Image (spheres, rainbow, N blue to C red):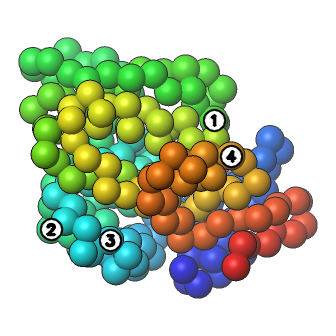
Amino acid sequence: MQELKDRILKDGQVRPGNVLKVDSFLNHQMDVELLDHIGAEFYRLYKDAGINKILTIEASGIGIACLVATHFHVPMVFAKKAKSINIDGDVYHSKVHSFTYGKDYDITVSQKFLNKGDRVLLIDDFMANGKAMNGLIDVCEQAGAEIVGIGICIEKGFQPGGEDLRKRGFRVESLAIVENMTDDSLTFRE
Ligand code: 5GP
């Protein structure tokens, strides 16, 4: 998606540890018009897939997934990171290793909101090693929900997550795939 690539080149910052900072427009301060265009692009890609639910992970996926859900006119569910006493009833849960914080955390989704027969599109801001997506896949498998596709805003193509998931047969659509990044240059996969 050219608009996203242009914005990454304009406002993204490469940080040590293979971290791309895009917090001025994607995951802290949010350019909601850009998010809306991202939502439209995922709709264009997946509109014929019979999706009835969008699933993401707290926190940075939420804003993006909301705008995606408005295009599909379906509910958006996010996996919660903290165990909450507010969730009544049973939950699915999984463990995820955080790329940005370097430690494991639990995710939970109420069994009320993810069911057998759901056709789910998984959404996130970044894909690095694929741990966040694997947590969401685990939760969908527990629910008997079908994963119709995975939609990622920025995939770091030099890290293995995207390739691993494609090899496992998942449809992964990334709007920008970073091939290589250093302090002073960033290139995309064509
Ligand atoms: P993975 O689970 O694929 O290893 O990493 C994806 C998750 O880590 C995303 O949910 C995202 O929040 C975070 N993440 C991974 N790489 C980056 C990055 O380069 N920049 C930012 N801002 N977040 C990242």
Residue under numbered circle 2: 73
Tell me, yes or no, whether the two marked residues, 4 and 3, touch with CB atoms within 8 Å. Answer: no
Left or right position of 34 against 180: left
- Which of the two residues, 44 or 163, is positioned nearer the viewer here? 163
- Could you tell me the amino acid type at mark 3? Tyr
Q: CA gap, disc 2 to disc 4? A: 32 Å
Q: Tag 3, which secondary structure?
A: helix
- The numbered mark at residue 65 is none
Q: Residue at x 60, y 70 (%)?
A: 176
Which comes before the other along the chain, label 1 or label 2? Answer: 2
Residue 166: % across, % down: 54, 54
Left or right position of 10 against 151: right
Residue under numbered circle 1: 99
Residue under numbered circle 3: 46
Which comes before the other along the chain, label 4 or label 3? Answer: 3
Residue under numbered circle 4: 160
Crowding at mark 3 (Cα within 10 Å: few <14, some 14-19, many 20+): some
Q: CA gap, disc 1 to disc 2? A: 31 Å
Badge 1 residue CB within 8 Å of ligand 1: yes
- Could you tell me the amino acid type at mark 4? Pro
Tell me, yes or no, whether the two marked residues, 2 and 4, touch with CB atoms within 8 Å. Answer: no
Q: Residue at x 29, y 42 (%)?
A: 78
Q: Residue at x 9, y 18 (%)?
A: 89
Residue 93: % across, % down: 32, 22
Q: CA gap, disc 1 to disc 4? A: 13 Å
Tell me, yes or no, whether the two marked residues, 1 and 2, touch with CB atoms within 8 Å. Answer: no
Q: In this orientation, does residue 69 appear?
A: yes
Q: Tag 1, which secondary structure?
A: loop
